Image (cartoon, rainbow, N blue to C red):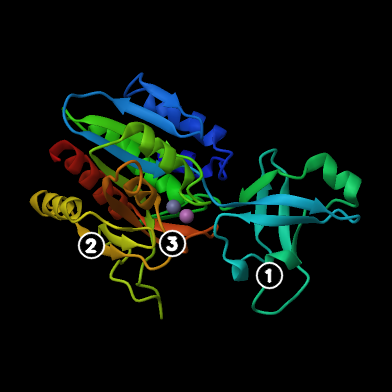
Amino acid sequence: MELLKILASEYGPSGREEKIRDTIIKYAKDITEDIKTDVLGNLIVHKKGNGKKVMVAAHMDEIGVIATVTDENGFIRFSPVGGLNNKDLIARRVVFENGVVGVIGSEEDNKDRKIAKMYIDIGAKNREEASEKVKTGDMAVFCGEFIDSGDTVISKALDNRAGCYVMLEAMKRINTENDLYFVFTSQEEVGLRGAKTAAYSIAPDYALAIDVTDTGDTPEGIKMEVKLGNGAAIKVMDRSILCDSYIRSVLIETAKKNNISYQLEIMNDGGTDAGAISLSGTGVKTGGISIPTRYIHSPSEMVSKKDLNSCIELLTAFVNNI
Ligand code: CO
Ligand code: ZN
């Protein structure tokens, strides 16, 4: 889990993927020299072959907040970068790129909290002192230490560093003549932006997005088949896509043939890079492999190690056989 810990702990809100990208490059270099960063900041790792052109995407950005206005007393107003759960933000710690930590507070104490009424408190006495540390446009991410707790791991940013981890591990194992593009995408959390231009430039025959998905297994949880620990989730639908039925059936057959645990995913909340890729160019046959995750978009996202392995195995077998 050392690699996952390194990936999850790295700073990288949408649009500011430099650090996490540099970290991923270090590991991708062992696999191929053909690595480039495109205009939007996507990292494109190419393993050349003369078979089908396959694109596998995992976004490397994480959700965060962006400083907007600092008041006379040094309190910093902010906007969300990606889908924050407003009700869960009070007293959360966030950390800016330079290491400055703040606590999120709110003017109001009711249940439907609005971000417009919240602020980040970095302990500054006044505007001048705050502005030395945090400027308008600076971004912060959740503090959420990586915990290895036996069968599961808990951390901030497992959405989607867990997906990046699955892709890096699969890249080491894949052995095929297919022409492979592994894309660590930028700006997924603000609207699947990087994947859009990356897919256009690659124009693949087939594509897969690797990302996290919700689970339906917590008390009074959402109605969903996916359970933590029950295997790789094969995406059927999310808010951005109805997955290509051929890809979906190949994934299911591949899982069965190789004895890989799998479950079927219909995620009613949120989209993935799969949606943007499927609509690029003249259209791309696209599917998804998802990592079952509890408490998505919190500092304490939780995934199962068994599921991570199932996802690595399924991705490897799919790319080898498609
Ligand atoms: Co997300
Ligand atoms: Zn995600």
Q: Is 258 in front, or is 39?
A: 39
Beta carbon at label 3 within 8 Å of ligand 1: yes
Q: Amino acid at mark 1?
A: Lys
Query: Can residue 110 be seen from the camera position used here?
Result: yes
Disc 3 secondary structure class? loop
Residue 136 in the image, given as x and y percentages of width and height = 76, 45
Observer-nearest of 282 and 26: 282
Q: Which residue is mark 3?
A: 270
Query: Which of marks 3 and 2 precedes in the sequence?
Result: 2
Q: Are marks 3 and 1 in contact (CB under 8 Å)?
A: no
**Left or right of residue 69, residue 207 in this image:** left
Mark 2 — residue? 263
Say whether residue 199 is left or right of residue 261: right
Mark 2 burial class by Cα count in 10 Å: few <14, some 14-19, many 20+: some
Q: Earlier in the sequence, mark 3 or mark 1?
A: 1
Q: Tell me the distance, in whole angstroms, between the alpha carbons under discs 3 and 1.
A: 20 Å
Residue 30: x and y, percent?
Answer: 35, 23
Q: Quadrant of the C terminus?
A: top left
Q: Amino acid at mark 3?
A: Gly
Label 2 beta carbon within 8 A of ligand 2 = no
Quadrant position of residue 244: bottom left
* Residue 183 visible in the snapshot: no
Question: Does residue 106 appear left or right of residue 210 in this picture?
Answer: right
Q: How many marks?
A: 3
